[in-house]
């Protein structure tokens, strides 16, 4: 199940990253040199590239194994939690020495994404081997 979630997560991130480059979906802000995806979230080419790369890694983890998927969500959740904290600290200013677009809606969304990723990485989802009769395991009645 976690593998499938990782692949879906990755596909969404790939889509968001690509849409960040599409005029009309991303409204450009003349004074900031960046755009607003869906008119809300600050994005720029670096931000979009991070989404595309994240999506690729998530899909790769999902195709690899459950262990890789859990590891992806653990690392990704921690990184996004840190990015969210930085986003709240910087407010509507760019992150990482002005390299990546940021605004408060980004920080809120990154917080939600971090919480979901941390749950998926560290929380418990049933595996296919936890059901009676699977893989010859015996569960006393």
Image (spheres, rainbow, N blue to C red):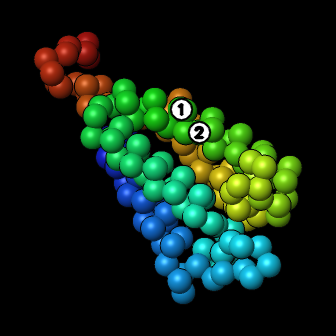
> Can I make out residue 9 in this image?
no
Decide: is 25 above or below 6: below
103 vs 73, nearest the viewer:
103
Quarter that holds the C terminus: top left
Instruction: Please provide percent x and percent y for residue 7.
Output: 34, 49
Q: Residue 77: which numbered mark, if any?
A: 2
Instruction: Please provide percent x and percent y for residue 104.
Output: 78, 62
Tag 2 and tag 1, C-beta contact below 8 Å: yes
Residue at figure coordinates x 35%, y 47% from the top left:
59
Residue at figure coordinates x 66%, y 53% from the top left:
110
Residue at figure coordinates x 54%, y 86% from the top left:
24
Quarter that holds the N terminus: top left
Residue at figure coordinates x 58%, y 79% from the top left:
26
Decide: is 3 above or below 50: above
User: Image quarter for residue 12?
Assistant: bottom left
Decide: is 3 above or below 135: below
> Can I make out residue 76 in this image?
yes
Residue identifier under label 1: 74
Secondary structure of the residue carrying numbered label 1: helix
Secondary structure of the residue carrying numbered label 2: helix
Is residue 17 toward the left or the right of residue 88 in the image? left
């Amino acid at each position: 199940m976690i593998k499938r979630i990782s692949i879906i997560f990755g596909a969404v991130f790939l889509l968001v990253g690509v849409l960040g480059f599409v005029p009309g979906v991303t409204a450009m802000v003349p004074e900031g040199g960046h755009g607003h995806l869906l008119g809300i979230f600050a994005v720029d080419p670096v931000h979009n590239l991070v989404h595309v790369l994240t999506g690729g890694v998530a899909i790769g983890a999902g195709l690899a194994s459950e262990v890789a998927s859990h590891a992806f969500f653990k690392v990704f959740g921690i990184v996004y939690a840190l990015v969210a904290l930085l986003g709240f600290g910087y407010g509507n200013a760019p992150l990482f020495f002005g390299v990546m677009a940021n605004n408060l809606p980004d920080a809120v969304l990154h917080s939600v994404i971090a919480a979901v990723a941390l749950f998926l990485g560290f929380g418990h989802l049933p595996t296919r081997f936890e059901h009676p009769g699977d893989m010859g395991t015996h569960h006393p009645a």
